[in-house]
Image (cartoon, rainbow, N blue to C red):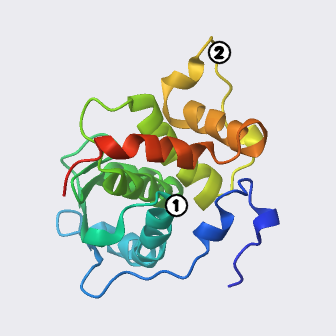
């Protein structure tokens, strides 16, 4: 499959970094555990190569310091969790009901959670920005959604509502008003990144 060119991407400043040739370091990897939800084994088989390809790309975009290498990530699909998905350390938990009911959204949700694994920000970080960056990388970069896809905030500083609203604000800034702002915001957040 041919990689898109920078002109095809809605976000251009980080384009070259996105398509740098990266691979998971020897010994690093992603595991998807479906033992609690074996009905999702086929989904896991499709999601694993995507996650394996995108983990180093996301790390490159986030400018994750390379001294410790990329984490081994374990994704657990479980019926006990009733939300969508969450990341904690290098683990991701996904709700089996969400994977079942929203298979078209579940790989994107996995990409969003991989961003959180790489962010490694401690509690107390700016929630709207942490989630906005994760959704920005998921929707604008991974999925290539156009600016019109994102909801518009209905109030002053509505971008602080996080997720897709914040991602849309970041995409708008990147596309015109402040190219490179996402990378700048990531660098500003680095001092608060959890020590390895």
Q: Which residue is drawn at 58% across and 18% down?
A: 158
Which residue is drawn at the image coordinates 29% and 88% (left, top)? Answer: 26
Q: What element carries label 2?
A: loop
Q: Which of 93 and 63 is in front in this view?
A: 63
Toward the viewer: 27 or 179? Answer: 179
> Residue 56 at x, y = what percent?
44, 72
What x and y, as percent, mark residue 77? 26, 60
**For residue 131, above or below residue 151:** below
Side of 106 where 34 appears, left or right? left
Q: Report helix, strand or loop for mark 1.
A: helix
Image coords of residue 124 (percent x, y):
27, 29
Q: In this view, does 48 lie above or below 116?
A: below
Q: In which quarter of the image is residue 82?
A: top left
Mark 1 = which residue? 61
Quadrant containing the N terminus is bottom right
Q: Residue at x 17, y 63 (%)?
A: 36
| Residue 163 screen position, x and y as percent | 50, 35
Q: Residues within 10 Å of mark 2 (few under 14, many from 20)?
A: few
Which disc number belongs to residue 192?
Answer: none
Residue tagged 2: 154
């Amino acid at each position: 499959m041919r990689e898109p060119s920078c002109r095809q991407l809605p976000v251009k400043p980080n384009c070259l970094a996105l398509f740098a040739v990266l691979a998971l370091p020897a010994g690093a990897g992603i595991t998807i555990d479906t033992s609690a939800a074996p009905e999702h084994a086929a989904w896991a088989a499709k999601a694993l190569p995507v996650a394996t390809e995108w983990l180093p790309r996301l790390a490159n975009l986030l400018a994750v310091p390379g001294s410790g290498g990329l984490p081994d990530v374990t994704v657990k699909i479980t019926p006990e969790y009733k939300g969508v998905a969450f990341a904690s350390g290098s683990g991701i938990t996904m709700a089996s009901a969400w994977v079942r009911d929203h298979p078209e959204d579940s790989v994107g949700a996995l990409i969003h959670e991989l961003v959180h694994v790489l962010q490694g920000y401690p509690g107390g970080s700016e929630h709207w920005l942490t989630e906005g960056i994760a959704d920005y990388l998921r929707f604008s970069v991974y999925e290539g959604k156009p600016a019109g896809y994102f909801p518009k905030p209905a109030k002053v500083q509505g971008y602080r509502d996080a997720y897709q609203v914040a991602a849309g604000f970041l995409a708008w800034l990147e596309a015109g008003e402040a190219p490179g702002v996402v990378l700048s915001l990531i660098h500003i957040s680095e001092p608060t990144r959890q020590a390895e």
